Image: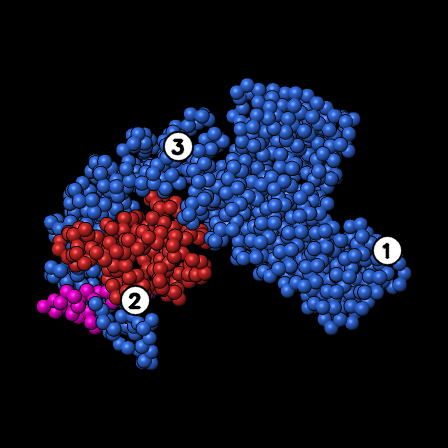
Chain colours: A blue, B red
Amino acid sequence: MAQPLVKKDDDRDDEADYSPFLGIEKGAVLQEARVFNDPQLDPRRCSQVITKLLYLLNQGETFTKVEATEVFFAVTKLFQSKDIGLRRMVYVMIKELSPSADEVIIVTSSLMKDMTSKTDMYRANAIRVLCRITDGTLLTQIERYLKQAIVDKNPVVASAALVSGIHLLQTNPEIVKRWSNEVQEAVQSRAALVQFHALALLHQIRQNDRLAVNKLVSSLTKGSVRSPLAQCLLIRYTSQVIRESANIQAGDRPFYDFLEGCLRHKAEMVIFEAARAITELNGVTSRELTPAITVLQLFLSSSKPVLRFAAVRTLNKVAMTHPMAVTNCNIDMESLISDQNRSIATLAITTLLKTGNESSVDRLMKQITNFMSDIADEFKIVVVEAIRSLCLKFPLKHKSLMNFLSNILREEGGFEYKKAIVDSIVILIRDIPEAKETGLLHLCEFIEDCEFTYLSTQILHFLGIEGPKTSDPNKYIRYIYNRVHLENATVRAAAVSTLAKFGAMVDTLKPRIFVLLRRCLFDNDDEVRDRATLYLNTLGGDGTVVQTSDDVKEFLFGSLDIPLVNLENSLKNYEPSEESFDINSVPREVKAQPLAEKKAPGKKPTGLGAPPAGPPSTVDAYEKLLSSIPEFANFGKLFKSSAPAELTEAETEYAVNVVKHIFDGHVVFQYNCTNTIPEQLLENVTVIVDASEAEEFAEVASKPLRSLPYDSPGQTFVAFEKPEGIPAVGKFSNMLRFIVKEVDPSTGEAEDDGVEDEYQLEELEVVAADYMLKVGVSNFRNAWESMGADCERVDEYGLGPRESLAEAVNAVIDLLGMQPCEGTEVVPNNSRSHTCLLSGVYIGNIKVLVRLQFGLDGPKDVAMKLAVRSEDEAVSDAIHEIVASG
Amino acid sequence: MDLCPLIKNILLLDTEGKRVAVKYYSDDWPTNSAKEAFEKAVFTKTQKTSARNEAEITMFDNYVVVYKFVQDLHFFVTGGENENEIILASVLQGFFDAVGLILRGTVDKREVLENLDLIFLCLDEIVDGGIILETDADVIAGKVASHSMDDGAPFSEQTITQALATARERLTRSLLT
């Protein structure tokens, strides 16, 4: 067909590089398009020119408005030709040009003629083209033909009309909805694809009518669908119906049998669609899951990578919620670690890490080590994160997991990957005390040969905090001081600060540290010298070994208890004068939280560098915030802050959530408020709390929020007194009260006069779990033995009928608010009994350990034996009290 | 349309990742440079893998991509991250086999470019605006080929030589797999 056009100048006539389109140029092809206007059309040549035009468009070339119009008009001339091949190219070309409304009129009559042609291919294609380019005004004219086409006996024509209907429904729903009789007839078609397209259209016509969809699903699930694609659609519609039907009793879920039946379908796409639908059912039970897992397991050993991928990806998701259900597949999954397709291998590894038990960890780590060397960084990061959570689940295994992390830390890798590893080690050091010393040494070794300044400085900072608290701080000094010799100025400065921290915290090291710091005075960088000088002078490095006073420590190493934004603002406003800048004049209130923070709710600070940034979100930050408010300053030490609980529905005028701060003798509610109305400014915002259902609480203070502008969150507080050390509980109803002022949206200025208004919030509750801190222990048995049986309290409880053992276990964990240990919160499938180990710290800083033994008593009834050990009998009794009354 | 299986694009690239023929059915890539960036990413991600016997699969940027290579051609089909992988694979297989039938077994870049008009028609017959039109390679190839023959003649009524060539190609394919 198309001949080689213009040869490239350099005569590189390489066979392999040969292309009929070599050196093709838009201008030349547009010239060639003049043949469309010839009185005697040459269909073959015209076809070639259209192909060239399509090739240009396909390569990303664009036509100007004028060029496109010219080509379009020329192409319309080609309708004169009777050549079928050319006509097909014309159809494709018209769709690619997407003509404007006035241009469409030119081809309308030609296309309408084709639509009623005897040739099936003309009818099908003309429908698709016309429906694609029409703007709807034309639709009423051709509606009659379209309705006929839907029930045309040629499946290609019917499909063309149905698919066009699906597209048109977006723009002209009222017209397409009139076709539902014809569409319904097409659903019964013997042609597979027609059935698929008809079902898709019918569902869309009815999608807002829940009852009609219900009827559609229940009639079709009885079995008249032949096309696998249509069957997949039906499975999707069925899961939607299941999702939306309320009050599902476990066991008799509607349509579950249909989904299960599809697992035996002969088409793989249907089997998979059904299996996936079952795993995604709300509150799926292990009995419902089993058949789906079984077919997915078969896919795992398929010869087709697509099937293996689909199965392992689905099982990976299931492992997050039902790890025990997936354990049966572990052997197949392990063989996938060596899969050629690295996406499959990575998914298999992370699934195994989620489902693995303590005994399999070592074997798994061995396999992963071989695997890590030949995957990309992005996969490695996924694996590192999975290992981190595994380590937190099985703290006893920290040795081998920490070793693994340090090994991969030494290997080649990009910044993101290295950062993920370092973050993981830092988190493990924080959460698993036993892992601290080895972890710190691993980090020390890493900075000996670390190419990333950011990571080096962050690790040095972390060493400065954690190192002095270890049993032998001495051994870190060498690593830190090496940095002063070998690194760039930024790292050197960080190393100087870390050295000084060791000096300030560990008196025995002080003389040696001073020697080292004095050497830094000759550094060629200002910052390094300045830091060394500052530390030497403030820490008393004048030769005498003195106890560094707490004030100095606080000044040098204490964190700044002022929001940095406020400090920056105050410094900007400060004008040089006789009066020096007073840091106490900087406001401590956290005013407007940055918007970005709001967009990532619940995102926990992880790893290095995270905690100090942003508004208060950790207990430390909360504590600082509360102690900066004079009314609450004398409440003592903050025991616990709850996670924020929403008091408003999503997308209401005002968004309010509450954080409960528990003190020994007080409770403070922190209401985080956001005003989502741009035309309003709220002032003097308070929450009126009715504590009539919380008898032991008495309101002592309330701190209103002066002003709450649009979209910049603020806080108001209410404090209650409660009996000291007693875990009082109660319900509180809340009313937001404020003065609302209209804001002119154009100027952003508020009017002077405001109106007082109120806004009802949801209730909040102080529960027993609020008095319990989740604190894990790494070895429960040791902790249990060493706690002794002096204050042990044991009793048995009947929990009544429960949906499953797992549900009962979770309910008790939530009720107590304690930390599950050693992965015992996971209940294996089909087990009749389970032991769960919990640990926590109760108000008054009393350590509590709980051993829960659950058993099924009859078909659904769950019985529980609760053994509590703590440092105080009264607390052991209190735990029983919580369970007895919960 | 949210429940209907949707195809985001079908790509046919050469061994350097350059476009041979592509078709986008989604607004996810509004500009040509966005499209080229996506093609480059897909190409580099899959380049080193071997997808010559069975279709392979990968996932990135919240897209699932299934792909298959033959000679100096790389075939790709892209779907959203929640799409049924096996449906995507059936579209890929339909396209791949249809091209094989249309080109009578000699599938390489040169042959595809020589018959680019047929390849465009083939893409046009597989997916319409993201919705799967047909996945059966015989039907697709039949619809594409029918234009060079008499009105509506099914693919099975080809000339003897054509039929033989097709049969030979089928046989080799069944022996290979």
What mark, if any, has residue A260 been given in the picture? Answer: 3
Q: Do labels 1 and 2 share a chain?
A: no
Asked whether residue A640 is drawn in magenta, I would say no
Front-lying residue, A406 or A507: A406
Q: Residue at x 26, y 76 (%)?
A: A6
Of mark 1 and mark 3, the one earlier in the sequence is 3
Q: Distance between the residues labelled 1 and 3?
A: 71 Å
Q: Mark 1 sits on what residue?
A: A508
Residue A545 in sight in this render: yes
Chain for mark 2? Answer: B
Q: Position of residue A753 (x, y in %)?
A: 52, 44
Identify which amino acid the numbered label 3 is placed on: Glu
Query: Residue at the location (62% across, 23% down)?
Result: A864
What type is the residue that disc 2 sits on?
Arg
Is there a contact, CB below 8 Å, between mark 1 and mark 3? no
Element type at mark 3? helix
Q: Distance between the residues labelled 3 and 2?
A: 48 Å
